[in-house]
Image: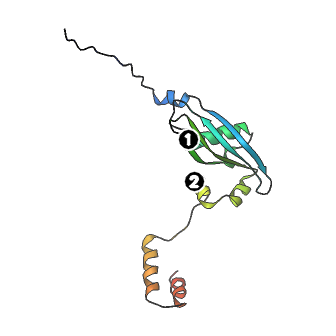
Amino acid sequence: CNAVSLFHVRLRFVSREDRMAETCTVRTRKFITNRLLQRRQMVVDVLHPGRANVPKNELRELLSKMYRTTKDVVVVFGFRTQFGGGKSTGFALIYDTLDFLKKNEPKYRLARLGLYEKKRPSRKQRKERKNRKKKVRGTKKSKVAEKKK
């Protein structure tokens, strides 16, 4: 017999379905009704022990149920997970209607929600326009850009 003692470590492998089933607790604080921007705004604390973090879509669904509204008018952003995990804090906005959301939200957050698509010419067209502008001076630069559109 060897004098070396063996320690058995029990590893727990959790399937993806089990991880999704693990609950998370959502609490809101600093709730403000902002009539000027037609929205409710709040700080959101999410307790998620055993999970890395909670997807924003899932948080939007939970908040829409809590505040009796639809998922499409809820915007969540700025989530930071505390050191050690298990708790995240972020910000949520719940607009009165989708029209107010589109009017008041910045374009980059609308793009995240799939409500805004920035139209820009192809990379090659932009580079060609830039190089045509280099060949002229002063106010003619804008004329060169307009002419080729």
Q: Is residue 2 above or below residue 99?
A: above
- Amino acid type, residue under disc 1 in the picture: Pro
Identity of the residue drawn at 39% across and 22% down = 11
Residue at disc 1, secondary structure: loop
The residue beneath circle 2 is: 112
Q: Nearer the viewer, residue 6 or 137?
A: 6
- Amino acid type, residue under disc 2 in the picture: Arg
Identity of the residue drawn at 58% across and 45% down = 79
Crowd rating for badge 2 (residues with CA inside 10 Å; few <14, some 14–19, many 20+): few
For the view shown, which residue lies furthest in the left direction?
A: 1
Q: Is residue 29 above or below residue 124?
A: above
Question: Which mark is first along the chain, 1 or 2?
Answer: 1
Residue at disc 2, secondary structure: helix
The residue beneath circle 1 is: 55
Identity of the residue drawn at 27% across and 13% down = 5
Disc 2 vs disc 1: Cβ atoms closer than 8 Å? no
Q: Is residue 142 above or below residue 12?
A: below
Residue 136 x, y percent position in the rendering? 46, 90
For the view shown, which residue lies furthest in the top direction?
A: 1
Q: Nearer the viewer, residue 134 or 51?
A: 51
Crowd rating for badge 1 (residues with CA inside 10 Å; few <14, some 14–19, many 20+): few
For the view shown, which residue lies furthest in the front direction?
A: 3
